[in-house]
Image (spheres, grey):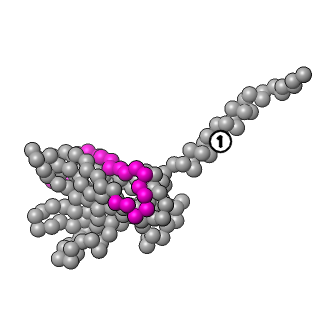
């Protein structure tokens, strides 16, 4: 003889929903802290990097520094930068423009997904589009290169969000 309590299916459903919420919160990507440095070379190409030591000495006095909002749940120190990146705008064949760059995993563990949301602006500072560049399964110490077509009118870029997990 099997005894079933009334409402057991609802309790099981509620428990399952609670577990799904907990797992989704644990697996959601966390925002990373980053300071981004912008500089322009003698050809007028705009470069962005997270590591100021990669900027040639003659351009260091004219760099612009920007910060992304730090996710307070991570409480990372500013000296610990788990994800380094550098990128620039390139114009190539037929006038196509690209964001070209790379990301480097600066930790001792695998970064499954790294996403960078970038806004593109024209010469008047009007936002043209927002694009995302990404890297998947980035091993420790490995450089992952990316290339993303952007609007031809783009003159400036601004990183809006950097996330990884």
Identify the residue at image location x=29%, y=72%. 52
Q: Is residue 125 magenta?
A: yes
Q: Nearer the viewer, residue 68 or 148?
A: 148
On the image, the x and y values in percent for residue 13 come to: 69, 32
The quadrant in which the N terminus is found is: top right
Q: Residue furthest top?
A: 1
The magenta stretch is 123-143
Identify the residue at image location x=37%, y=51%. 135
**Quick check: 26 above or below 58?**
above
Answer left or right for 149 relative to 34: left
**Quick check: 161 above or below 22?**
below
On the image, the x and y values in percent for residue 50 come to: 33, 66
Write down the residue under mark 1: 19
Q: Residue furthest right?
A: 1
Identify the residue at image location x=15%, y=67%. 41
**Quick check: 8 above or below 157?**
above
Identify the residue at image location x=84%, y=25%. 4
Main secondary structure type of the part rendered in magenta: strand
């Amino acid at each position: 003889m099997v005894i079933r309590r009334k409402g057991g299916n609802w309790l099981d459903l509620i428990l399952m929903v609670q577990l799904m919420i907990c797992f989704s919160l644990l697996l959601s990507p966390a925002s990373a802290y980053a300071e981004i440095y912008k500089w322009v070379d003698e050809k007028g190409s705009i470069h962005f990097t997270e590591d100021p030591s990669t900027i040639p000495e003659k351009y260091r006095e004219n760099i612009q520094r920007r910060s992304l909002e730090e996710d307070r749940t991570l409480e990372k120190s500013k000296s610990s930068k788990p994800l380094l990146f550098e990128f620039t705008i390139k114009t190539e064949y037929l006038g196509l423009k690209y964001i070209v760059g790379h990301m480097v995993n600066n930790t001792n563990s695998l970064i499954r997904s790294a996403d960078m949301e970038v806004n593109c602006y024209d010469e008047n500072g009007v936002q043209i589009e927002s694009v995302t560049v990404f890297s998947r399964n980035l091993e420790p110490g490995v450089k992952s290169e990316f290339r993303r077509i952007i609007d031809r009118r783009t003159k400036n870029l601004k990183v809006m969000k950097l996330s990884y997990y």
